[in-house]
Image: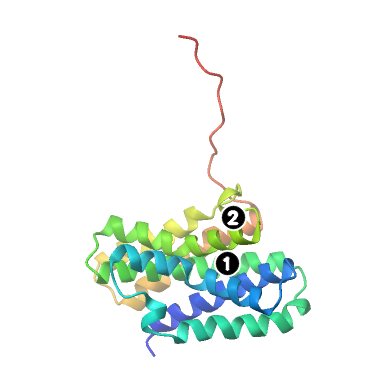
């Protein structure tokens, strides 16, 4: 198994784990755990593959689904042992976010997408699964939090695309992209890092 393939399966696993942690917070049954793990683990990648008009990754390789189901079962029986589960969710989501941003951009480039398109698809791959998870669970989406989230995914995807253009080995590009995004997201979790936000202004009389 190559380094890139390891990143792919780890991304699915940690996103699936974040889905099970949400399911535990909502006190769902085992089927609910499976739904949340699968939705989070494959949601973003499914949208990416449909846009790229390629075989949906979890239909071509069902080990992805087995990973999600396995994580769901483990999470159902062990989530109660994790203290401060929301904190664990944030860190699991941060890892999955950067892994998926890099892998989404990589797949888009391999399918012939341009650099900008690849970066956008990397961001979508990283964020849409978590967005679907939060909508289904009725949770406030991380999209709406003040601290960096989509920005961290964008940093991972753009950094990977830029490094890839230099012709360095893929595993180095991937590590750099993951590191940049994870540092930003980690700073957001620990320090509340955020970009300046729009502030509404009174309308102008014409």
Across and down, in percent, residue 204 comes to 50, 14
189 above or below 89?
A: above
Across and down, in percent, residue 82 comes to 75, 76
92 above or below 194?
A: below
Label total for image: 2
Mark 1 and mark 2 in contact? Answer it, CB < 8 Å. yes
- Please tell me which residue lies in front, 51 or 143: 51
Specify whether 205 is left or right of 110.
right
Specify whether 89 is left or right of 175.
right
Q: Secondary structure at mark 1?
A: helix
Disc 2 marks which residue?
A: 142
Query: How busy is the neighbourhood of tag 1: few (under 14 within 10 Å), some, or many (20 plus)?
Result: many
Q: Is residue 4 visible?
A: no
Specify whether 35 is left or right of 53.
right
Disc 1 marks which residue?
A: 93
Across and down, in percent, residue 201 comes to 55, 23
Quick one: label 1 or label 2, which is nearer the N terminus?
A: 1
* Residue shown at the point (29%, 57%) measured from the top left: 117
* Residue shown at the point (39%, 85%) measured from the top left: 61
* Residue shown at the point (73%, 67%) measured from the top left: 25
Q: Is residue 13 visible?
A: yes
The image's colouring method is rainbow
Query: How busy is the neighbourhood of tag 2: few (under 14 within 10 Å), some, or many (20 plus)?
Result: some
- What is the quadrant of the N terminus in the image? bottom left
- Please tell me which residue lies in front, 103 or 159: 103
Q: Secondary structure at mark 2?
A: helix
């Amino acid at each position: 198994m190559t380094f890139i393939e390891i990143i792919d399966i780890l991304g699915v696993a940690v996103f699936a784990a974040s889905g099970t942690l949400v399911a535990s917070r909502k006190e769902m049954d085992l089927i609910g755990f499976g739904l949340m793990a699968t939705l989070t683990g494959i949601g973003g990648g499914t949208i990416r593959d449909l846009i790229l008009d390629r075989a949906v990754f979890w239909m071509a390789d069902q080990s992805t689904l087995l990973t999600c189901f396995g994580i769901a079962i483990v999470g159902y029986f062990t989530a109660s042992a994790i203290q401060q589960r929301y904190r664990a969710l944030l860190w699991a989501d941060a890892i999955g976010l950067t892994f998926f941003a890099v892998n989404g951009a990589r797949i888009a480039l391999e399918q012939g997408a341009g650099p900008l398109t690849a970066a956008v698809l990397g961001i979508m791959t990283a964020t849409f699964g978590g967005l679907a998870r939060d909508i289904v669970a009725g949770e406030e989406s991380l999209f709406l939090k003040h601290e960096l989230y989509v920005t961290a995914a964008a940093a991972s995807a753009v950094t990977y695309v830029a490094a890839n253009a230099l012709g360095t080995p893929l595993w180095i590009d991937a590590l750099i992209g993951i590191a940049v995004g994870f540092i930003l997201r980690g700073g957001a979790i620990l320090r509340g890092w955020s970009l300046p936000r729009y502030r509404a202004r009174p309308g102008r009389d014409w």
